[in-house]
Amino acid sequence: MTHNETKTLFEKGLISATQYGQVNEYRSRNIFSLLIELRVLLYLSILLITTGIGILVYKNIDTIGHTVILSAILLASVTCFFYCFKNSRGFSLGPVASANMWYDYVVLAANLLAGIFMGYLQYQYHPFGSYNNIAALLPTLLYFFSAYYFDNKAVLSLAITGAAAFIGLSVSPRGLLENDFSNPALSYSAIGFGSMLILGAAAREWSDFKSHFSFTYRNFALHIICITCLSNLFSDESALYYFILTAAVSYFVWLAYYLGSINFLFFAVTYGYIGLNILLIRIVSNNDLYMLLAYIGPFYFGASVWFFIKWLRGFRNRLRYAGVR
Amino acid sequence: MQAYDRELLENNALIAEADSLQHAGFISSEQNNFIDSKLPSLSTQSNQLIRAGMFILACVLFSSCCGVVALFSSGFIFEHYGWIMLVYSIFGIAATEFIVHKPQYFANGIDDAFVFCTQLVLIGWVGVSVGSKDFLMPVFVAMVIAGVFCCVRYVDSLAAFLACVGLVCATGDLFMQAGDAGRSLLPFGLMSLGAAIYYLSQWLRDNEDLGSYYFKSINVVKGFGLALFYLAGNYMVVREGRVLLLNTEIMPGSDIPLAWLFYAFTVLVPVGYIYFSLIRKDRIMLWAGIFSLSFSIFTIRYYHHIIPAEWALVIGGLVLLAITWFSIHKLKGRTSGLTYEADRLSSQGEILKAEYILVVQNFGAKPAAVDNTGPAFGGGDFGGGGAGDSL
């Protein structure tokens, strides 16, 4: 088969001869980018080395001693931080371009090492007694500082995760499903935490203070609030969570239109649809309408499919033609 | 041949090309929109996440339709299971034809799901109507026929994958029927099949008459052929397969026949894949090479513990780091051929934006062990909540 879509576009008069020439010139360079492959191998090698060293240290802890290991981790972290400060382009309210290709990874490594150091210290010597939360809070504060000063979104994610852990919530992609939401206090704090993230993102955009961070904040907020509500809806009949879920989904659908973000639209609608189905199944099972459900099912799901396709097409056209970013 | 209008399919490819040109900065977004509005096209979904969501929803729709049929025929269903499957198959084909022709869905999740479900019920129908004896071969043949038919007619790459699976199962079954001699020759049979599938994909790719919309299906076939060729000759697969199929035990000190040959395959095939992929600039073969190389290292370490695991990890990691570091320095800033710079015409770089998910999953803080916040609350075990809409 022949790949000549660009040529066809040119022949149909949809792109100009200059553009066709530019694309052909670029294609003739025969570019084969190994960016992803080499990054993956880089990650893999770091993972292998750290795992190996971890096992080595674990097996030889009696001969090495905790103090030596702690000092080594601290030294490594401080070295990385020194490198970051030396190469940093200084603080700015807006985004800062990375100093070089390794820089963002060194920032990440410095913070991770500092976090490991703190955790190790608390586990071995208990400087904060049994207040493990306080010990976890210190690295979180450092993460927030680094994220803002070095302008690093990966570290910002770590900071949000740390802050959530401080109130007893696990918000890593898998951890979010493992929280014990049958505990009402945890559910309320999760929803409160999510709302604070939303407010924080809005304030950040309004004041132009690191407004490019707001996607990270809102993304966490969307998943935290919706998953908390849904997991409560599975076991609980209270109207409160329907109300909160409706509010959150409406807000994020509005936001998706406002920002032109297909990501927010997809997740908000998916969570909303799951919530709607839980409500419908409740109604069916409370009124013993199973037969009706079986006969109506095809129409209901068929209508859902038709509706979603229409909606998505409308959204796509709006993105393309209405001049939304 | 294909159910879609050829011109519309080609327009879809043109629109995708224009999107990629805009992404690369060759044309403006206004021009891209103009191209989009000029070309009539099929209803498609380029966002793979949404496509996956629609796939699940459409599978639910298909099964709820089948449920209604089952309700109407509940008295009849247990004696005549084959007939019900036939009804499902006819419904599946009719529904697929409808969504392909009327709303013209193409690769937007809905048509993928209907083609997939139709194939499943077709294969099920063959399996049920053949009876309980010797039903394997007809099922495998049905898989191949249904897969090839659906791949060609509905331009579906998942169908191509199913056809390949059917082909492997059928070949395996043939060799298994041929007694011990056949079973010993199974690795070579499957390796030849893998090579044949790979060359078939190359031949199809070079075929001028074939529309370029089959490109994805052909890539799936190619990746399958490469994976099969490697796995069929891998020492571990051959050895464990032999133990399983021939009911033999391999004593310590002895080895399978032709062990040296399979060791050679295990080492040489990944190296060959990586070498040729870089020469031919073939990304699928490159990934096949990376995965097969990792599996080869695992294979050899599984049978030969030369050094302790932790040292193997550290040394292996250091070697890999050195190679990667060296390659990055060599390839950085190159503007042609092999390079470490992102390709403007490929959206692969988007994946790197998801890096932070890896970081959070691996290093994100977990809540501290609860020893000062009162008793832990029991119960409320909740998992896999994402599947909540599937009744």
Image (cartoon, rainbow, N blue to C red):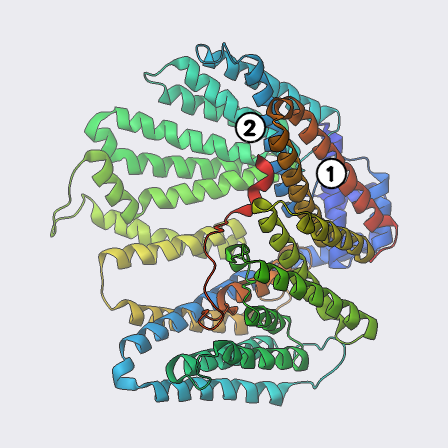
* Secondary structure category for the residue under label 1: helix
Q: Position of residue B171 (x, y in %)?
A: 36, 29
Q: Nearer the viewer, residue A8 or A254?
A: A254
The answer to whether A318 is drawn above or below residue B328 in the figure is above
**Pick the front one: A275 or B18:** A275
Point 78% across, 67% down: residue: A202
| Numbered badge on residue A308 | 1
Pointer 1 indicates a residue of which chain?
A
Residue A95 vertical position relative to residue A86 in the rendered view, above or below: above
Q: Residues within 10 Å of mark 2 (few under 14, many from 20)?
A: many
Q: Which of the labelled discs sits on residue B117, or is there none?
A: 2
| Secondary structure state at the residue bearing disc 2 | helix
**Residue A15 seen from this side:** no
Q: Amino acid at mark 2?
A: Cys
In the image, taking residue B245 as reference, residue B273 lies left or right, namely right
Quadrant for the N terminus of chain B, please.
Answer: top right
Give the alpha-carbon distance from disc 2 to disc 1, as whole Å: 20 Å
Label 2: chain? Answer: B
Query: Is A52 rendered above or below residue A310?
Result: below
The answer to whether marks 2 and 1 mark residues whose Cβ atoms lie closer than 8 Å is no
**Residue A69's spot in the image, x, y percent?**
37, 85
Residue B12 quadrant: top right
**Rendered residue at 62%/66% (across/down):** B341
Image position of A258 with respect to B227: above or below: below
Q: Position of residue B215 (x, y in %)?
A: 60, 39
Location of residue B316 in the rendering, given as x and y in whole percent from the top left corner: 36, 68
Q: Give the amino acid type for the residue marked by disc 1 in the picture.
A: Phe
At 74% from the left edge and 82% from the top edge, which residue is drawn? A92
Please determine if labels 2 and 1 lie on a single subunit. Answer: no
